[in-house]
Image (cartoon, grey):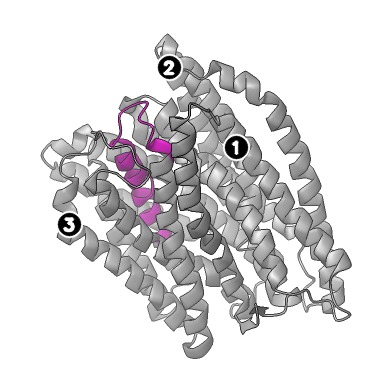
């Protein structure tokens, strides 16, 4: 499905419904993310290390099961039905957190993992089906689609900490349930708009046996995930095993591909590996950066008081500002015949990530006050660099999969993109524990040194990786085929 118009904001009608559903679903997820690590440390009494590794295992499981959800959407229920079922399951998970977040903590997280697994890969797969191969609007479409994620997350990360501060943890999490409910209602009322698109399974009659098996499987995944979050070593082992299996399936797909498809699939795999590095660093936002804001940052932005968790809203704020600018830039570059390749965008994204962490490291060393605190406005700059990098890597990752992989296995490939990110979530958790503050806490001047050292090591390592990526851009660009 495609249309002739090629402007940066001219897209098929189903795109805007998917934009809306994704926005509200992400409202629920990122509202929860903004609170989760602080909730574990402040309310449940977790150490920094346990909170970081628990959250990272949760995030890794969220991404790991997306590949399974993509397969169900491709082959069993259809992208549309699987997406809707996932939305219902997510609403149940957020509802349990909103009712009693202490009592239902692990069961709710398990249900949210299962719901995300069903939901997340399928809207992306549906967006990819709106455009023919080679359509110049693909990069712009996925950049705007990525903006939907950040409209929802900005609203949630701004609102949920505010509600939590005044009405308690249950109320903060209940806001996430409200956002998910809006997504479900939105889909129900406007689902007919999506009728022309979907996987082959969407256009077959619903097989109730398949539906029943999927529901039972969802319950098993939710229960198993809740248990695994209490046994993190086992969880990590299973995740690594799952990644190896998916990588094997991906390699099999490369061997089965037509000759003209093979080079694109290999390049896609290389760029996915590069993205793992980026997402391990991205994982610092809800973990080490979140705790850094709570312990070493003056809680204000341009004179306005904020909660520590609200600094995470700077990420979606910058995404919303930068997304339409990049969408227009991609369209103009295409019309002028200039080619800013996907490998080049990924390398530039890593350079931006390097700048983000070096900024914080240098500020912590040279611009902190005598009490060990830095001005909150420095995080505005750091998050700007990080967000631009995110748009160039994560925002275009979906477009990369849509552009470089065959239509017949789009759902699996979208799921594989998210599956490899699960490894990054675990790695990100390990990186965050390098800045764990000892149990019982330390003075701000001591924690500033701990965080500043971590950010400097991240910045230097990322700069070296970015340099290698940049050197290989011409080679990868040469072998991409249309």
Question: In percent of the image, x 38 and y 80: which residue is there?
Answer: 99
Q: SS of the residue at dot 3?
A: helix
* Residue 90 image offset from top left, x and y in percent: 35, 62
Graded by Cα atoms within 10 Å as few (under 14), some (14 to 19) or many (20 or more), the crowding at tag 3 reads few
- Above or below: residue 244 compared with residue 389: above
Q: SS of the residue at dot 1?
A: helix
Graded by Cα atoms within 10 Å as few (under 14), some (14 to 19) or many (20 or more), the crowding at tag 1 reads many
Chain-order first, disc 3 or disc 2: 3
Residue receiving disc 3 = 190
Is there any visible trace of residue 149 in the rendered image?
yes
Chain-order first, disc 1 or disc 3: 3
Residue receiving disc 1 = 346
- Residue interval drawn in magenta: 112-139
- Residue 239, image quadrant: top right
Residue receiving disc 2 = 261
Q: Residue furthest front?
A: 336
Q: Is residue 102 left or right of residue 407?
A: right
CA gap, disc 3 and disc 2? 36 Å
* Residue 265 image offset from top left, x and y in percent: 48, 23
């Amino acid at each position: 499905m495609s249309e002739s118009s090629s402007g940066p904001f001219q897209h098929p009608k189903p795109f805007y419904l998917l934009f809306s559903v994704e926005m509200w679903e992400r409202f629920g997820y990122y509202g929860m993310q903004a609170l989760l690590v602080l909730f574990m440390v402040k309310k449940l009494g977790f150490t920094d290390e346990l909170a970081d590794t628990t959250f990272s295992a949760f995030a890794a499981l969220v991404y790991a099961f997306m590949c399974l959800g993509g397969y169900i959407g491709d082959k069993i229920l259809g992208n549309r039905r699987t997406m809707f079922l996932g939305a219902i399951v997510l609403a149940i998970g957020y509802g349990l957190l909103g009712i009693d977040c202490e009592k239902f903590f692990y069961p709710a997280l398990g249900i949210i993992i299962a719901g995300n697994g069903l939901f997340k890969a399928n809207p992306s797969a549906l967006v990819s089906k709106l455009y023919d191969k080679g359509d110049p609007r693909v990069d712009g479409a996925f950049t705007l689609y990525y903006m939907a994620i950040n409209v929802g997350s900005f609203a949630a990360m701004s609102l949920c900490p505010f509600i939590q501060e005044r009405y308690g943890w249950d109320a903060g999490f209940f806001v996430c349930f409200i956002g998910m409910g809006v997504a479900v209602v939105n889909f129900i009322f406007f689902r007919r708009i999506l009728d022309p698109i979907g996987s082959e399974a969407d256009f077959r009659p619903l097989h109730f046996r398949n539906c029943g098996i999927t529901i039972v499987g969802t319950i098993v995944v939710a229960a198993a995930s809740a248990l695994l979050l209490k046994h993190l070593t086992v969880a990590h082992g299973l995740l690594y095993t799952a990644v190896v299996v998916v990588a094997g399936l991906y390699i099999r797909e490369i061997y089965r591909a037509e000759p003209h498809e093979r080079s694109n699939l290999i390049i896609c795999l290389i760029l996915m590996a590069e993205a793992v590095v980026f997402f391990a660093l991205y994982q610092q936002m809800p973990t080490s950066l979140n705790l850094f804001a709570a312990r070493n940052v003056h809680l204000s932005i341009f004179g306005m008081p904020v909660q520590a968790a609200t600094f995470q809203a700077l990420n979606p704020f910058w995404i919303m500002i930068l997304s339409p600018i990049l969408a227009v830039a991609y369209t103009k570059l295409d019309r002028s015949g200039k080619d800013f390749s996907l490998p080049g965008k990924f390398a530039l994204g890593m350079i931006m990530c390097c700048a983000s962490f070096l900024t914080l490291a240098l500020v912590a060393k040279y611009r902190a006050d005598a009490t060990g605190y830095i001005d909150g406005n420095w995080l505005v700059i750091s998050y700007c660099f990080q967000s631009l990098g995110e748009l160039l890597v994560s925002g275009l990752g979906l477009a990369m999969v849509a552009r470089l992989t065959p239509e017949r296995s789009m759902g699996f490939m979208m799921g594989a993109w998210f599956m490899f990110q699960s490894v990054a979530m675990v790695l990100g958790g390990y990186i965050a524990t390098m800045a764990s503050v000892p149990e019982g806490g330390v003075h701000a001047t001591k924690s500033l040194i701990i965080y500043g050292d971590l950010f400097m090591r991240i910045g230097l390592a990322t700069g070296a990786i970015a340099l290698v990526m940049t050197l290989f851009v011409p080679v990868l660009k040469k072998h991409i085929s249309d």
